[in-house]
Amino acid sequence: MSNARWNLPGGKKDIQPIARRGSGWANAGMPKPWPLYRLTDLASATRVFVTEGEPAADAARSIGLVATTSPHGSKSAHHADWSPLAGKEIVILPDNDSDGAVYRDAVVGITMKLTPPATVRVVELPGLPPKGDIVDFLDAHDTVEPDALFAIARAIQSLADAVRESSQREANP
């Protein structure tokens, strides 16, 4: 499955699904459940970052993180096949808005019910503007230097580690 995406004036977007149907392509979505974005990257990963939307997943990947998302936005998490994340450590990087919270809660609920359940952490990236995501977080650090990008990835990994440690302390006082 793929999407054709047009960014329209005023921050709007038009997304049309394109899927293989028989021997050709159609302007239609795939049958449900939909595969996760960048599915082939997930098999060997132990920690997977989940974002809301492909551009955010690509931003996470640009700094070396294994990242995925479900197709079709924040209200469609329940239409995806999350089974490839069973037993993995998942770090959700939610958008800084109400849709991000809805998506975060849906992904937590779904992945905790996998067999075996995923270990789920939520990392709220610091300093995000309203409606911001990891794309905005990286833009705020405005660098293309490999060492700086590596440091940003390390900082995000450390935020995830801190959430895990906090969760373990709360579960095992």
Image (spheres, rainbow, N blue to C red):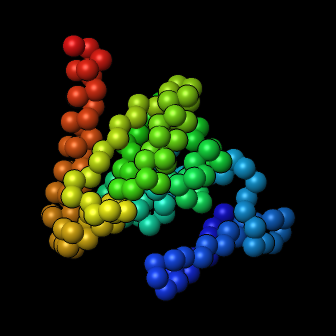
Q: Quadrant of residue 31?
A: bottom right
Q: Is residue 44 visible?
A: no
Q: Residue at x 41, y 40 (%)?
A: 90
Q: How many marks?
A: 0
Relative image position of residue 159 (x, y in whole percent): 22, 43
Relative image position of residue 76 (x, y in whole percent): 60, 52
Q: Quadrant of residue 84?
A: top right
Q: Quadrant of the N terminus?
A: bottom right
Q: Is residue 73 left or right of residue 127?
A: right
Residue furthest out toward the right:
22
Viewer-closest of 150 and 113: 113
Q: Residue at x 47, y 37 (%)?
A: 108
Q: Residue at x 21, y 36 (%)?
A: 162
Relative image position of residue 13 (x, y in whole percent): 54, 76
Relative image position of residue 126 (x, y in whole percent): 22, 53
Q: Quadrant of residue 6?
A: bottom right
Residue furthest out toward the top:
173
Q: Quadrant of the C terminus?
A: top left
Q: Is residue 116 visible?
A: yes
Q: Is residue 131 left or right of residue 116?
A: left
Viewer-closest of 65 and 110: 110
26, above or below 8, in the image: above
Residue furthest out toward the bottom:
9
158, above or below 3, in the image: above
Q: Is residue 93 left or right of residue 148?
A: right
Q: Residue at x 48, y 63 (%)?
A: 54
